[in-house]
Amino acid sequence: MISSRNSLHSLLAVLALLVLLALVPQFSPSNRLLSLAISAGINVIALYGLSVLFGQTGILSMGHAALVGVGAYTAAMLLRDFDVGFWVALPFAGLFAAVAAAIVGIPSLRVSGHHFVIMTFAFGQLLTIVLTNGGDFTGAASGISILRPVTLFGIDLGDLQRFYVLVVAFVALAAVASWAIINSSYGRTLRAIRENEKLAAALGINVGRHKIGAFVVSGVYAGVSGVLLAYFLGHISPQQFASFPSIYLALMVMIGGARLLLGPLAGGILVAFLPEVLNLDPVESRIVYGVCLIAVILFLPNGLIAGIGELWQRLVGGFGKTSAEATLKETGR
């Protein structure tokens, strides 16, 4: 009961934070700030999918950006070839990305650990090669342009401020969906596989099916993220979905924390805005990201948010213990 209440509190905290973030356009921020915030929000949606895969199931993928690319290219091709807009393309992108994720997940039934990480990394590179050499079908190296804005009930959402609110709404939906997965029997099954795969199999859990299922779920998140990215940028190309963007996604979820609902949100915002706050160039930002990742692995293995929570509990616990000792001393007098 307590854990269920705490979990609900974490969801309400994330939603409250998102409501505050949705009010940012009211303060007339610069276009650069809004663009960074939109990019961070789109990444966070993909990160919630990666947190289901990594945080709940214990499978780390270095090809997640490729699944985002599947969603983005699906939306772009549907618009170019069939004149299908954002809202109709959204479920198709999620479906195709989920199928691609299932295909990527099949090797996880035979290999694991760093071998599987290398395979997912190779998948990102392979997709980039296919898209680059796809000719007119994929737009080759130059990519595909998206020349239609997102509309809702006749309202043009192509404006940065409106698109920002749209992305925040999708982040909220992603957070609620992740919370539902984490607190369901399915989520508990995934965590059982993460903690002890052999024991879970001995208890009758179909480990292979649930692993593939986790990949499928993460693919849906990635596909939705890809559609938003395609319509936000207005043009997509293969290099945007290569292996190194996947490394950045893995970095974000590891820094923020993959097992807590607030982790992906914190990781996405931190990695997006840290170079801006510190005024770092791309090379310097990569160095800082590397240092942050090493620090998290060594000192905060469960992520920044979990580390802050543990520190707070120690402080509160220490304060409560000190107060109790003082009360006992006073009583003894």
Image (cartoon, helix red, strand yellow):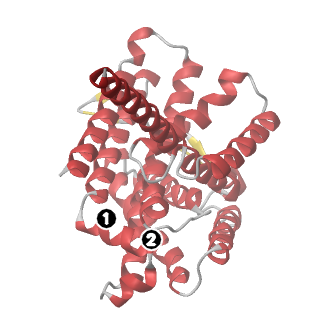
> Which of the two marks, 1 or 2, is nearer to us in this view?
2
Between residue 267 and residue 239, name the one nearer to us: 267
Calculate the distance from the C-alpha at mark 1 to the C-alpha at mark 2: 11 Å
Element at badge 2?
Answer: helix
Query: Residue at the left extreme?
Result: 1
Q: In this view, does 21 lie above or below 134?
A: above
Name the kind of residue labelled 1 in the image. Gly
Whether residue 237 is visible here, answered yes or no, is: no
Name the kind of residue labelled 2 in the image. Arg
**Residue 116 point in image, percent of width and height:** 62, 75
**Residue 21 point in image, percent of width and height:** 39, 24
Report the residue at 65% width, 52% height from top: 297
Q: Is residue 285 above or below residue 160?
A: below
Mark 1 lies on residue:
187
Relative to 236, is 208 on the left or the right?
Answer: left
Mark 2 lies on residue:
194
Between residue 201 and residue 119, name the one nearer to us: 201
Query: Residue at the top extreme?
Result: 27
Whether residue 177 is visible here, answered yes or no, is: yes
Query: Residue at the front extreme?
Result: 333
**Residue 197 point in image, percent of width and height:** 44, 80
Where residue 118 sits, quadrant-wise, is bottom right
Where residue 333 sits, quadrant-wise, is top left
Relative to 169, is 36 on the left or the right?
Answer: right
Circles 1, 2 touching at the beta carbon (< 8 Å): no
